[in-house]
Image (tube, helix red, strand yellow):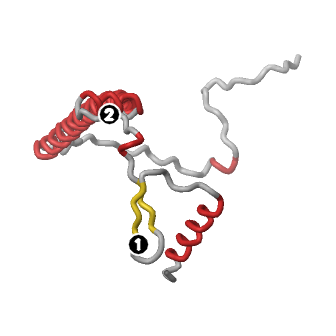
């Protein structure tokens, strides 16, 4: 009876293909471990010192920068507060100036402090400039008739044009 199972040889040798039967096997190389220079795990003290100095300098610079920024922020806030104070003071002074320059205030100051009063009609003197080098003093107001107004306007025009 024939079986489909694989045949196992008794001497436990595997059959090689014809190509490899005559080739000689190479022996595995023998490795030897030698004691010698290992990897450097130490950092040089100079390099460590430079890194520490650089780290301290960067941290110090960052802290100094923050301190300067805080001081400048405080100065800015103080300046803003001072500006607001001065602006409010300006508004107060402006309103005080406007109240002191009103006609009623000026009149009260002139009468109370300076002893001045309203002008009466007898205290007014009118001067008329008629002609060349002639000045006339009158006690009455200038004539407001249209002819007089026109002549005064014409005299003013001639004087402006330097013809008179």
Image quarter hosting the N terminus: top right
Residue 134's tag is 1
Q: How many marks?
A: 2
Residue 120, position in %: x, y?
39, 38
- Label 2 Cα neighbours within 10 Å, binned few <14 / some 14-19 / many ≥20: few
Residue 69, position in %: x, y?
28, 35
Q: What secondary structure is marked by label 1?
A: loop
Q: Residue at x 42, y 52 (%)?
A: 139
Q: What secondary structure is marked by label 2?
A: loop
Residue 117's tag is 2
111 lies left or right of 143: left
**Residue found farthest to the right:** 1
- Label 1 Cα neighbours within 10 Å, binned few <14 / some 14-19 / many ≥20: few
Q: Residue at x 18, y 41 (%)?
A: 57
Q: Nearer the viewer, residue 42 or 161?
A: 161
Q: Nearer the viewer, residue 69 or 24?
A: 69
């Amino acid at each position: 009876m024939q079986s489909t199972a694989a045949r196992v040889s008794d001497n436990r040798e595997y059959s090689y293909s014809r190509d490899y039967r005559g080739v000689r096997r190479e022996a595995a190389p023998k490795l030897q471990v030698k004691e010698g220079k290992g990897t450097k795990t130490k950092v040089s003290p100079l390099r460590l010192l430079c890194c520490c100095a650089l780290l301290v300098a960067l941290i110090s610079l960052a802290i100094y920068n923050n301190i300067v920024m805080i001081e400048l922020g405080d100065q800015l806030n103080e300046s803003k507060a001072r500006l607001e104070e001065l602006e409010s003071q300006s508004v107060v002074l402006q309103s005080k100036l406007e109240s002191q320059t009103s006609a009623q205030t000026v009149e009260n100051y002139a009468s109370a402090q300076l002893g001045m009063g309203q002008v009466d009609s007898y205290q007014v003197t009118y001067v008329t400039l008629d002609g060349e080098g002639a000045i006339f003093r009158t006690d009455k107001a200038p004539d407001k008739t249209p002819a007089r107004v026109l002549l005064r306007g014409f005299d003013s025009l001639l004087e402006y044009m330097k013809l008179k």
